[in-house]
Image (cartoon, grey):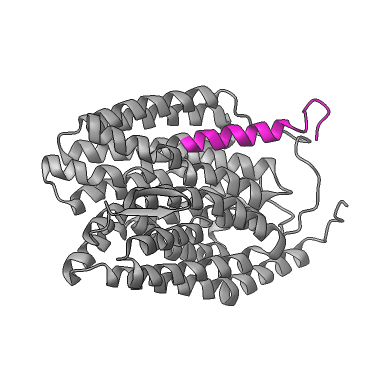
Amino acid sequence: MSEGTSPSYRWWQLITGIVCMVMIANLQYGWTLFVTPIDNKYHWGRAAIQVAFSIFVLCETWLVPVEGWFVDRFGPKIVVLIGGVLVGIAWLMNGAASSLTMLYIAAALGGIGAGGVYGTCVGNALKWFPDRRGLAAGLTAAGFGAGSALTIIPIQHMIQTSGYEATFTWFGIGQGVVVVVLSLFLAAPKAGEVPAVAPSQRQTRRNYEPLEMLRSPVFWVMYAMFVLVGAGGLMATAQLAPIANDFQIAKVPVSLLGLTLPALTFALSIDRVLNGLTRPFFGWVSDYIGRENTMFIAFGLEAIGIWALSIFGTHPLSFVILTGLVFFAWGEIYSLFPSTCTDTYGSKFATVNSGLLYTAKGTASLLVPLANILNTATGNWHAVFIVAAVMNAVAAIMALAVLKPMRDAHNAREAVAQPAVPRTA
């Protein structure tokens, strides 16, 4: 650390990034609560409304590399500030939207803003914590995964009492203002401001530029795995309320952990918490047992959880517990993949490089409307669950059978090309 920087400064940077992530979480994880009310008012059909969700995710993910380019050149403040303004405007537009076109434009603006905040905060965490990269990325991503947990019940209540339009408006203003204010405190690390500690993970000794990374087969293997795992989780995120309604258990009271709530409300709340906890947990685990080993465990659990949900999910209590397992085994992709990417390709261009990998989430989102089509064609959600479970099982196997040996070979080639640098104790 440099003499002018307090050791606690990087932790404040991490906390600031986490709170920013909390403020944009509802754009994705609160969306499912608005689908049915919007359809009840305009009768556009759930599949058409869910196109807005796909547009949001596409803009949130596919533009992150561009936003990362601005971060690397102008710093994190301006990108997050503009992002905060855009997410506020997006929710105001959602509340006023009287056509699918306006809803889609709002989704695009929200995606651009959320992507700017997300990519910047994750990239900043990766740069500030080379010694605890999995944990730092996980904690930051947890803000996005669990950020909506505390607001699920207030949003549901406000939708019921004041309408979804007012809910979009007031939550949009509040979330946008907080992000704008916090953006002023963000800063990227300078030379000497991060600890020179040898991490336990295999990490590159040089920094790969984005185009150089795109020529690496390892990147595309990670991309394919990200799509496979991401698609199943995004389907569950966007379709959870419709699934619960079709199972006719959404409003059935469930008692668990001393609480009694309607099944859908309980599932949404506990899912957000577990989806947040899994990111730092598996990130921390991967710092010790390896990224690929952790991926195999998590993706395997996800496959089992989705399969079990297809069999036992019609029971209210099982629905709550199994959706919790699904989200716990899914959310860690947002800590494991950025950490693995930065381990493999260096931290100098971490915002852009991890952003390029993050576009896999956008690719995966294209499959979300297909879940409605498959559901309509088959008359139930069983086929959707089975497809998602198989995709996760394939990704789990790829982690050990494909990614791990390819990364070992990549590191071996690098060691030959560049002599080893003595590690600092």
Residue 29 quadrant? top left
Find residue 372 and report its horizontal and vertical position in percent.
Answer: 23, 60
Relative to 371, is 64 on the left or the right?
right
Find residue 154 and report its horizontal and vertical position in percent.
Answer: 36, 34
Find residue 129 and report its horizontal and vertical position in percent.
Answer: 69, 44
Kindly identify the residue that appears in the image at 63 percent across and 69 percent down: 293
Q: Is residue 305 visible?
A: yes
Identify whether 274 is placed above or below 148: below
**Magenta segment range?**
1-22
* Image quadrant in which the N terminus is located: top right
Determine the main secondary structure of the stretch shown in magenta.
Answer: helix
Residue 421 quadrant? bottom right
* Magenta span contains residue 401: no
Kindly identify the residue that appears in the image at 52 percent across and 57 percent down: 333
Relative to 272, is 240 on the left or the right?
left
* Magenta span contains residue 9: yes
Q: Is residue 230 visible?
A: no
Along the viewing direction, whichever of 33 and 393 lies nearer the viewer: 33
Relative to 204, is 106 on the left or the right?
left
Identify whether 403 is placed above or below 175: below
Along the viewing direction, whichever of 83 and 244 lies nearer the viewer: 244
Identify whether 93 is placed above or below 409: above
Along the viewing direction, whichever of 266 and 255 lies nearer the viewer: 255
Find residue 258 and report its horizontal and vertical position in percent.
Answer: 46, 49
Along the viewing direction, whichever of 122 and 24 lies nearer the viewer: 24
Kindly identify the residue that appears in the image at 65 percent across and 50 percent down: 135
